[in-house]
Amino acid sequence: MIRISKKVEYALMALKFISDSDHKLVTAREISDKSNIPYDLLSKILQKLKNENILISNQGMNGGYSLNKRTDEIPLFNLMTAIDGDTSIAECLQDNSVKDCCLTDTCTIKLPVTRLQKELEDLFKSKTISDFV
Amino acid sequence: MIRISKKVEYALMALKFISDSDHKLVTAREISDKSNIPYDLLSKILQKLKNENILISNQGMNGGYSLNKRTDEIPLFNLMTAIDGDTSIAECLQDNSVKDCCLTDTCTIKLPVTRLQKELEDLFKSKTISDFV
DNA sequence: TTGAATTTGGACTAATATAGTCCTATATAT
DNA sequence: ATATATAGGACTATATTAGTCCAAATTCAA
């Protein structure tokens, strides 16, 4: 089944939380407590969002996270790749597919699957975080 | 990451194979050999397609499978649900969600996620097998 | 300058889903 | 009868996702 990961769900919830408390720094602990998201897991997610320049972080006491962009400037697609990495819908379409795609010889559907992937990407690119807050 | 399952890939390849050898009955063994799909796995997939009335099966010697509908009458969505079951993009959106959705109290994104799910479904419903053969 | 609050990040375990296998039963044409 | 099929349950293996644990680095403030 096609499913967005829990991590992406958590990321969306966190971004909404941060967006709602606008400009005030919010800590991972705060989001975790208020939104019932496992703290350690959330921390990792926020770090990834920071590494993708979606969030700004301040370490140390009184530290926390804040948005680095307006929510309508963050495509859902970027969030997904930031958190889950590659988003190809089939193994054989991965950019850096190390393992020989078992289908290369016999795969009869590579082209249409690629088209489908493009359409899904376009959909996820057309959505931004502002659609979720 | 969002990914269609190998089983759905195999199903698409099998349907293309059956579609190409039109009206002649083709056996699971034949598809398996020609398309490098594990036989046992393929058998299960074909059985599911048969149970969804996408294929017709004939048991016994000289048996095999044939299409029950034109490929443009089979939405990709139906294929996916036939093979992988429920297609909700998030656990909390499952129809028959047995387990309490951990997000019910605190989930802030259920509505927009539901909208996204609808759009994905529409996309998969708009594609038919004829797009893959 | 110490301590508490915070982010950072590696390594690990647990849980779940997907992929694949094995075996036996049932149907049918010859 | 027998060979060739589909039908389908039960099982194992593999991969992915989710979650945990621990230690380090940073920063504020008393």
Image (cartoon, coloured by chain):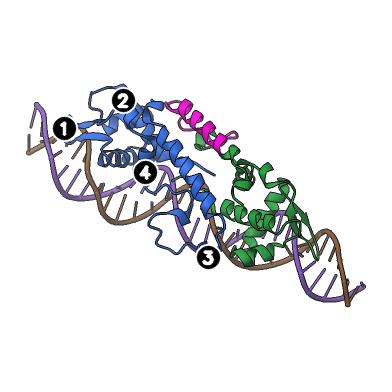
Chain colours: A green, B blue, C purple, D brown
**Residue B132 at least partly seen:** no
Is A107 on the left-hand or right-hand side of A22?
left
**Which comes before the other along the chain, label 4 or label 2?**
2
Foreground: A41 or B88? Answer: B88
Q: Are marks 4 and 2 on the same chain?
A: yes
Query: Mark 1 or mark 2, which is nearer to you?
Result: 2
**Which comes before the other along the chain, label 3 or label 4?**
4
Question: Numbered disc 1: what chain?
Answer: B
Instruction: From the image, tell me which residue sits under label 3.
Output: B105
The CA distance from mark 1 to mark 2 is 21 Å
**Which comes before the other along the chain, label 1 or label 2?**
2
With respect to residue A30, does B30 lie above or below?
above
**Residue B31 at least partly seen:** yes
The CA distance from mark 1 to mark 4 is 30 Å
Give the x, y percent position of residue B111.
Answer: 52, 52
The CA distance from mark 3 to mark 1 is 57 Å
Residue B81, label in figure: 4
Is B25 on the left-hand or right-hand side of A20?
left
Q: Are marks 3 and 4 in contact (CB under 8 Å)?
A: no
Instruction: From the image, tell me which residue sits under label 1.
Output: B61
Q: Are marks 1 and 4 on the same chain?
A: yes
Instruction: From the image, tell me which residue sits under label 2.
Output: B19
With respect to residue B24, does B55 lie above or below?
below
Foreground: A131 or B21? Answer: A131
The N terminus of chain B appears in which quarter of the rendering? top right
Q: Secondary structure at mark 2?
A: helix
Mark 2 belongs to which amino acid?
Ser
**Which comes before the other along the chain, label 1 or label 4?**
1
Question: Numbered disc 2: what chain?
Answer: B
Give the x, y percent position of residue C1.
Answer: 92, 73
A106 within the magenta span: yes
**Which comes before the other along the chain, label 3 or label 1?**
1
